């Protein structure tokens, strides 16, 4: 007689996100957000989300409720969009 035992060694993303500080990176440069996300997640200490559009950033901030938001900081990004994301986060 043989038995099969199923074991899940991988954590589910939602469980992992609850244990680690959550960071949302907002920037219109996908290369920057990808690199920052990759570097932070590689440490194993953070759960990181990246957004390249203001609307997506707002939705992600509401869903994820990050501990830290790194907003886009270039001069060509309308300040109103940055303020709106931060205001809605409160």
Image (cartoon, rainbow, N blue to C red):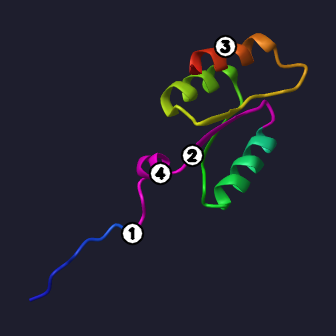
Residue that mark 1 sits on: 9
Which numbered disc, 3 or 1, marks the residue that appears first in the sequence?
1
Q: How far is the residue under mark 3 from the one under mark 1?
A: 40 Å
Residue that mark 3 sits on: 84
At horizontal 58% and vertical 16% (from top left) the residue drawn is: 88
Label 3: which secondary element: helix
Residue that mark 4 sits on: 19
Q: Residues within 10 Å of mark 3 (few under 14, many from 20)?
A: few
At horizontal 52% and vertical 24% (from top left) the residue drawn is: 62
Q: How crowded is mark 2: few (under 14 residues within 10 Å), some or many (20 or more)?
A: some
Kindly indicate whether the residue at mark 3 contacts the one at mark 2 (C-beta within 8 angstroms): no
Label 1: which secondary element: loop
At horizontal 81% and vertical 14% (from top left) the residue drawn is: 78
Kindly indicate whether the residue at mark 3 contacts the one at mark 4 (C-beta within 8 angstroms): no
Which numbered disc, 1 or 2, marks the residue that appears first in the sequence?
1
Q: How far is the residue under mark 2 from the one under mark 3?
A: 22 Å
Farthest residue, direction top: 80
Label 2: which secondary element: loop
Which numbered disc, 4 or 3, marks the residue that appears first in the sequence?
4
Kindly indicate whether the residue at mark 1 contacts the one at mark 3 (C-beta within 8 angstroms): no
The numbered disc on residue 87 is none
For the magenta stretch, what is the residue range?
A: 9-29
Q: Quadrant of residue 54?
A: top right
The numbered disc on residue 21 is 2
Q: Residue 11: image x %, image y %?
A: 42, 59
């Amino acid at each position: 007689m043989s038995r099969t035992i199923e074991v899940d060694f991988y954590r589910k993303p939602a469980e992992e996100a609850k244990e680690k500080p959550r960071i949302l990176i907002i920037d219109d440069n996908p290369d920057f957000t990808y690199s920052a996300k990759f570097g932070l997640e590689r440490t194993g200490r953070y759960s990181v989300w990246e957004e390249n559009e203001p609307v997506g950033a707002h939705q992600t901030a509401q869903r994820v409720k990050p501990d830290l938001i790194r907003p886009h900081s270039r001069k060509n990004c309308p300040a109103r969009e940055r303020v709106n994301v931060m205001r809605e986060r409160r």
